[in-house]
Amino acid sequence: MQSPDKRNFDAVAATWDEKPERVRLAEEVAAAIVREVPLFPQIQHLITAVAADW
């Protein structure tokens, strides 16, 4: 049983990207990970393709 004070993830996630600052922060974090963490080329291409769709 879930505690009554816990937020429902699905409900919160449904509107998460309505705040532009959240989207901007997520994009900056993703860009930093891609820039700083060595990834296999296939993963690098996948992340770049997904980010381009944002």
Image (cartoon, helix red, strand yellow):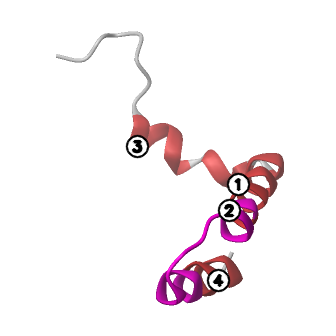
Frontmost of labels 2 and 1 is 2
Residue contact between numbered discs 4 and 3, judged by CB atoms under 8 Å: no
**Number of numbered discs on residues:** 4
Which span of residues is magenta-colored? Answer: 32-46
Mark closer to the chain start, 4 or 3: 3
From the image, give the main secondary structure of the stretch colored magenta.
Answer: helix
Q: Which mark is residue 18?
A: none
Coordinates of residue 39 in the picture (x, y in percent): 54, 75
Return the residue at label 3: 10
Circle 2 or circle 3, nearest the eye: 2
Q: CA distance from mark 1 to mark 3?
A: 18 Å
Is tag 2's residue or tag 3's residue first in the polypeptide sequence?
Answer: 3
Give the residue type that dot 2 points to.
Ala
SS class, disc 2: helix
Secondary structure of the residue carrying numbered label 3: helix
Would residue 35 appear left or right of 42 to someone viewing this image?
right
Asked if the residues shown at circle 4 and circle 2 are in contact, with their CB atoms under 8 angstroms apart, the answer is: no
Residue 48 tag number: 4
Kindly indicate whether the residue at mark 1 contacts the one at mark 2 (C-beta within 8 angstroms).
Answer: yes
In magenta stretch: residue 33 = yes
The three-letter code of the residue at mark 3 reads Asp
Q: In terms of sequence position, does the residue under pointer 4 or pointer 2 come before the other?
A: 2
Residue 30: image tag: 2
Residue 12: percent from left, percent from top? 51, 38
- Which of discs 4 and 3 lies nearer the camera? The answer is 4
Amino acid type, residue under disc 4 in the picture: Thr
Q: State the SS at label 1.
A: helix
Which residue is at 71% across, 51% downward? 18
